[in-house]
């Protein structure tokens, strides 16, 4: 069918050249204009439509840019079909980024716990769903949706719900951390806080000093951002300070990621003196400290040690808070506590990441805390965790053979069991799985995944009876493995 | 006070050397041992405690590593105070990452709308809170917390709540996108989807082809990850294909970020032919396409055009969905639709970013959709938006002087107004603000923030009357600006 276009076919509003291009495009799409058909000359169409020639020329140019027509010099402008481009003969493969490939590698190296259905879970740092304060939280959620309403369904405050930041600031003050709500950026659990604070200080190809062993998801966040972890071995009750000194002296190291309270996976708490040394070293080298305080609210024994953020006089500490262990992960509320420009930059990073978190849950958490329900829940949780820890310690002393050692946590969900030489955590994990017990093998807490004699044991999801039974089976597994090993007379002396 | 340590002071469980170190550390912290005091020799303490000398040596080493004691060769081991380290005399300054600094720059360059309290808002792509279906969503939320319960408060499925992924897959199939729930990764709005899919394909220092003008937060996400945007100018009804060809041919360009439906900020929808060309070009160059379909559900006129994901035969498209515009931002639910390994890698990236989203809200959204409430809401929204768009188009035709042109969107919240030469969007924005009207000036949608004659006008938050009044004031501002300009006789011919 021949080309047709009259002035009355043009709509108003859009620039005229776009109107012309649009009308022609529509005719191509409808099949009114077939592939290969010649369009009128620019002059002819300009006259017919009573517009400037430049306008028609612009329309044809736009159509050519879109691939709808071909302008052939000296011949005219022709409708064409879909451009056929040379393509690889095989399937098109879009390569992933190096960082994404690295993360997939880390995923593959992770222990699969999937086969452990029905096994006693001592592997995961998750609170027990049987103790979730579901009803009172639900009431808080209903209350804030009723009282605050539609405001909670907007993008809201980029920094997170002010009411929650206010409650958190009050609580932090009781821990000696003197900040206001303006120093707190809410995020999705401490995990997002880790990613944001890494990006706050480090560009890709920089490095981050980390305790070793440490939290595997921190290692994943580091790898996923193209950063390199620089391990600082844990010795005694904290990171080896000489090694930390060396690590922080490296120009590519931008920050130290540390879990001073109820360390993951060790379960230990670093002493005050050590904390002061860490801060002095970081200040000396002008490097940031990222303090992961994810289990801070779960102390059930001993006396609190001032946090790094509380001791920080130089504004070099960024502190991460979480409610995933002390309340439940589904609240998806955590916080980054920072100072000055660090807050502005965290907000910009957050904005460029996901435009902010779930305000209804943040507001519900604020209500839940103000109502006293959180403190009641904490009191009950601490009591339960204390009883579980005691059951675990007693069982370990009873069931584990000589040569096994373990830490004595004063809070949180986990302790660290070091198996006797020459056992390996991977083997014992596999054996225990067969006996119906899930434990977290130590190699996954190393930067390079090298073998480890350690196992992380969690009291989060099992009660005292289950813990006793699990440790009984674990003890059996360990003794059997030891008995099966060739005698290792010479190796005992290697152990300090 | 003299050093005291007896075997009965050691606890059981921990490795003996740590028990010894712990007991000594406690005495230092309690002040029982003063700074400068000498500890017993290794031999003496080993005898007193009836342990191996190596064990005491290990304890002293651990204490030295922590900074609690000093081992002085030939003299012995001494308690010491906090190490005094040479420090910079001024305050400690922790430098931010280059990416964070770049984001802060972008933030500073953003237009501040804060002075616009009480002004008619035509600037923001946000739905109108007066039309949030608050009550029915609240009922959905209460229902799922009642029916599903504690499971929604766990970490849950890393990929996001299965029930929501199932509903989304069903809806996508009606759009010709044949995927199952296993191809969908839920995230926090399309914004997190942008950041995740950028990281899926591009490492820092790579580049991303983007339409220009484009969504400013996509530019922020690109900058925040250390990536470089490569602008492809929008011409006629889509990106200039020759320029896109050149951009995708660059080895450092890893993907093309595009908003083909209800483009932000232009409001246009690219035609089918153009979409096929985009896919052919991307397949030819082996580059990914990130299709931002954030307003897909908001078509109120014209016929739907197949999405890039629906047309994709090579698995090169990653599609982003959002409910922030069609429902409300506070639901914080969006999705990335991908294929094969891309899904695995997105999950790993998500895991390393924040361990997943808010399950209660995801489950509530699934219930809300299944109940029919979402479709009822959409029907009402589309009707309202259509009326608002018509009011806007009529007002523009009536109030704007010759030389102004604008787009005619078939859905979504925004259209693009191009001011007559020689006006600049920044000036007109400022003038309009003084007249009580907020508009989004075009320079912020450019990669380099260079001047623009464009304004993005949003119908999201203002009803017809407000829109008419706002455009009346805007028309006045534009005419006054034009009248104040020196005559630009020669410049009109520059305009095509």
Image (cartoon, coloured by chain):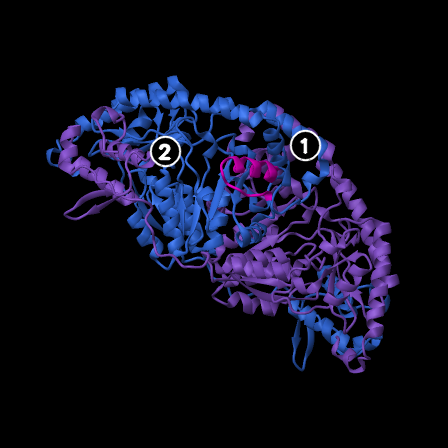
Chain colours: A purple, B blue
Percent of width and height locating residue A427: 75, 67
* A90 lies above or below A68: below
Instruction: Kindly indicate the quadrant of the structure image that contains residue B267.
Output: top left
Residue B67 visible somewhere in the drawing? no
Percent of width and height locating residue A13: 27, 27
Q: Is residue A240 magenta?
A: no
Residue B368 visible somewhere in the drawing? yes
Seen from the viewer's position, the closer of residues B69 and B100 is B100
Q: CA distance from mark 1 to mark 2?
A: 36 Å
Residue segment shown in magenta = B164-181
* B394 lies above or below B17: above
- Work out whether disc 1 and disc 2 sit on a shared chain: yes
Q: Pointer 2: what residue? A: B267
- Quadrant housing the C terminus of chain B: top left
Percent of width and height locating residue B440: 35, 33
Disc 1 chain ID = B
* B353 lies above or below A211: above
**Is residue B129 rendered to the left or right of residue B250?**
right
């Amino acid at each position: 069918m021949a080309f047709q276009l009259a002035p009355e076919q043009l709509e108003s509003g859009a620039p005229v050249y776009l109107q012309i291009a649009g009308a022609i495009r529509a005719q191509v799409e409808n099949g009114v204009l077939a592939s290969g058909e010649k369009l009128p000359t620019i002059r002819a169409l300009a006259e017919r439509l009573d517009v400037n020639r430049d306008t028609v020329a612009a329309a044809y140019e736009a159509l050519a840019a879109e691939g709808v027509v071909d302008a052939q010099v000296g011949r005219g402008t022709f409708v064409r079909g879909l451009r056929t481009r040379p393509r690889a003969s095989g399937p098109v493969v879009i390569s992933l980024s190096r960082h994404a490939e690295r993360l997939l590698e880390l995923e593959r190296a992770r222990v699969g716990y999937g086969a452990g259905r029905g096994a006693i879970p001592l592997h995961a740092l998750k609170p027990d769903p049987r103790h979730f304060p579901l009803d009172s939280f639900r009431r808080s959620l209903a209350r804030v949706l009723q009282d605050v309403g539609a405001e909670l369904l907007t993008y809201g405050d980029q920094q997170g719900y002010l009411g929650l930041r206010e409650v958190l600031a009050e609580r932090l003050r009781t821990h000696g951390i003197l900040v206001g709500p303006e120093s707190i950026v809410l995020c999705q659990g401490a995990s997002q806080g880790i990613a944001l604070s890494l990006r706050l200080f480090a560009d890709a190809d920089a490095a981050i000093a980390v305790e070793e062993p440490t939290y595997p998801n921190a290692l994943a966040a580091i790898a996923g951002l193209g950063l390199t972890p620089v391990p600082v071995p844990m010795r005694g009750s904290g990171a080896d300070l000489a090694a930390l000194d060396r690590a922080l002296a490296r120009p590519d190291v931008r920050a130290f990621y540390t879990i001073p309270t109820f360390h993951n996976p060790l379960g230990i708490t670093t002493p005050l003196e050590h904390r002061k040394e860490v801060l002095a070293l970081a200040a000396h080298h002008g490097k940031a400290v990222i303090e992961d305080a994810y289990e801070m609210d779960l102390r059930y024994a001993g006396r609190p040690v001032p946090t790094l953020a509380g001791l920080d006089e130089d504004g070099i500490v960024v502190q991460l808070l979480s409610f995933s262990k002390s309340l439940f992960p589904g609240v998806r509320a955590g916080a980054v506590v920072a100072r000055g420009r660090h807050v502005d930059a965290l907000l910009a990073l957050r904005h460029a990441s996901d435009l902010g978190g779930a305000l209804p849950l943040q507001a519900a958490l604020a209500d839940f805390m103000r109502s006293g329900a959180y403190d009641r829940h904490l009191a009950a949780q601490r009591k339960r965790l204390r009883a579980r820890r005691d059951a675990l310690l007693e069982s370990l002393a009873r069931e584990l053979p000589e040569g096994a050692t373990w830490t004595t946590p004063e809070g949180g969900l986990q302790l660290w069991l070091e198996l006797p030489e020459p056992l390996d955590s991977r083997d014992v994990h596999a054996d225990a799985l067969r006996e119906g017990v899930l434990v977290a093998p130590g190699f996954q807490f190393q930067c390079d995944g090298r073998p480890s004699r350690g196992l992380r044991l969690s009291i989060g999801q099992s009660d005292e009876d289950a813990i006793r039974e699990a440790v009984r089976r674990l003890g059996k597994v360990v003794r059997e493995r030891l008995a099966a090993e060739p005698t290792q007379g010479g190796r005992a002396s290697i152990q300090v």
